Image: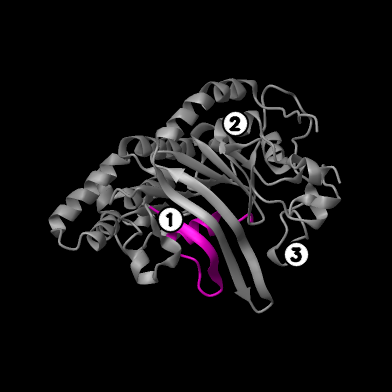
């Protein structure tokens, strides 16, 4: 098959090509922090068992940022909740695979055992801070509470000092005032900064950011993303960024996992994805990025929608929307495999299996 031509912002392409080799060298030196192996999650409903995530595998290294991308309904947030041990039970349940954090299998832990990991080893920033913060507790008290949960012998005065330090660290003006303020007294940007301070208070090794800037305007969004990236550099925290904004991915991510209908369809370096995407869904996402280089009358959009869990098609779940679909795509679901033997670039698409594609 001939190489697919993809229109990508010229400046983005140049930058991506320059950092690819450097990123590979860094990845070779970095230590694996999180290793997700064949993770499968099922929703058990009155209408039957619905597969939400199927055979998902990827790794994260210390100090790096992995972006998990895809449209709504692709399984991004379900992946984060699985790692955090926050799946709603019932109906959701991990039915297969492992989630190895520093060698410990989080998928095998009880709820009580998992509490020792949340906050101390894994922090999470949710989409809407107003629904995540307790409205009757001050910001300082909420940050202090997380610190004391994992450090029960710490004096309250020291925990308050640590909470105030975190408020200063995330760049909030007048930290003493914010420490005493309730969530409704803070702006959206300040509430999100408080959430970041809470998530990082115990210096977790992994920070999961689930659409952390969705409810914010573009100016505050840029500030929050810069803050998260600065915290990653200063604290050495690995960041999992769950987003549908490919522009954010191009600016922040070292690696990208592209998900569709609960499947991993492509996993590679961010620089490689933007210069050499292989899966038709990845190509569609990148082509959907608005560009100032080309004047177009209508923005590109991938036709159709992500299928509902109870309406998943046979074969490859993307084939109803794929312009390259063949009979084999409708019959069989492709497995994730290295692209031309490159373990740093894996794809789940029959186009790269010459025997199947030639049928």
Q: Dot 3, how many residues are within 10 Å of its Cα: few (below 14), some (14-19), or many (20+)?
A: few
Q: Dot 2, how many residues are within 10 Å of its Cα: few (below 14), some (14-19), or many (20+)?
A: many
Left/right placement of residue 72 relative to residue 144 reads: right
Q: Mark 1 or 2 closer to N-term? A: 1
Residue at disc 3, secondary structure: helix
Q: Dot 1, how many residues are within 10 Å of its Cα: few (below 14), some (14-19), or many (20+)?
A: some
Q: Is residue 201 above or below residue 284?
A: below
Residue 195: percent from left, percent from top: 37, 51
Residue at disc 2, secondary structure: helix
Question: What's the distance in space between the residues labelled 1 and 3, CA to CA?
Answer: 31 Å
Left/right placement of residue 152 relative to residue 257 reads: left
- Which of discs 1 and 3 lies nearer the camera? The answer is 1
Residue 6: percent from left, percent from top: 72, 29
**Which image quadrant for residue 86?**
bottom left
Question: What's the distance in space between the residues labelled 3 and 2, CA to CA?
Answer: 32 Å
Q: Are marks 3 and 2 in contact (CB under 8 Å)?
A: no
Q: Are marks 1 and 3 in contact (CB under 8 Å)?
A: no
Residue 106: percent from left, percent from top: 42, 61
**Residue receiving disc 2:** 272
**Residue receiving disc 1:** 100
Q: Nearer the viewer, residue 272 or 119?
A: 272
Magenta segment: does it hold 209? no
Please give the name of the residue rendered at 19% of the width and 53% of the height, measured from the top-left corner: 160
- Which of discs 1 and 2 lies nearer the camera? The answer is 1
Question: What's the distance in space between the residues labelled 1 and 2, CA to CA?
Answer: 26 Å
Please give the name of the residue rendered at 45% of the width and 34% of the height, measured from the top-left corner: 27
**Residue receiving disc 3:** 311
Q: Is residue 161 visible?
A: yes
Which region of the structure is painted magenta? 73-101
Q: Is residue 45 above or below residue 318?
A: below
**Which image quadrant for residue 183?**
bottom left
Q: Mark 1 or 3 closer to N-term? A: 1
């Amino acid at each position: 098959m001939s190489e697919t031509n993809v229109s990508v912002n010229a400046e983005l392409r140049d930058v991506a090509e320059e950092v690819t080799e450097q990123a590979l060298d860094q990845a070779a030196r970095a230590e694996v922090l999180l290793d997700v192996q064949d993770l499968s999650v099922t929703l058990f409903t009155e209408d039957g068992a619905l597969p939400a995530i199927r055979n998902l595998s990827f790794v994260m290294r210390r100090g790096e940022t992995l972006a998990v991308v895809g449209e709504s309904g692709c399984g991004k947030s379900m992946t984060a909740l699985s790692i955090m041990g926050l799946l709603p039970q019932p109906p959701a349940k991990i039915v297969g695979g492992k989630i190895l954090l520093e060698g410990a299998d989080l998928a095998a832990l009880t709820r009580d055992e998992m509490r020792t990991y949340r906050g101390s080893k894994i922090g999470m920033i949710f989409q809407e801070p107003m629904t995540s913060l307790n409205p009757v507790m001050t910001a300082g008290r909420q940050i202090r509470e997380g610190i004391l949960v994992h450090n029960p012998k710490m004096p309250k005065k020291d925990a308050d000092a640590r909470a105030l330090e975190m408020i200063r660290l995330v760049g909030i003006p007048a930290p003493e005032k914010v420490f005493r303020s309730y969530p409704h007294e803070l702006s959206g940007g300040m509430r999100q900064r408080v959430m970041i301070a809470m998530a990082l208070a115990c210096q977790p090794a992994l920070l999961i950011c689930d659409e952390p800037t969705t409810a914010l305007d573009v100016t505050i969004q840029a500030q929050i993303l810069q803050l998260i990236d600065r915290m990653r550099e200063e604290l050495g925290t690995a960041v999992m960024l769950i987003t549908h904004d490919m522009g954010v991915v191009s600016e922040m991510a070292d690696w990208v996992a592209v998900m569709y209908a609960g499947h991993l369809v492509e996993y590679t370096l961010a620089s490689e994805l933007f210069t050499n995407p292989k899966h038709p869904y990845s190509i569609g996402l990148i082509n959907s990025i608005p560009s100032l280089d080309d004047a177009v009358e209508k923005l590109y959009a991938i036709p159709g929608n992500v299928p509902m869990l109870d309406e998943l098609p046979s074969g490859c779940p993307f084939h109803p929307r794929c312009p390259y679909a063949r009979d084999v795509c409708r019959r069989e679901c492709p497995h994730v495999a290295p692209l031309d033997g490159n373990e740093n670039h894996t794809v789940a698409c029959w186009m790269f299996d010459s025997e199947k594609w030639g049928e």
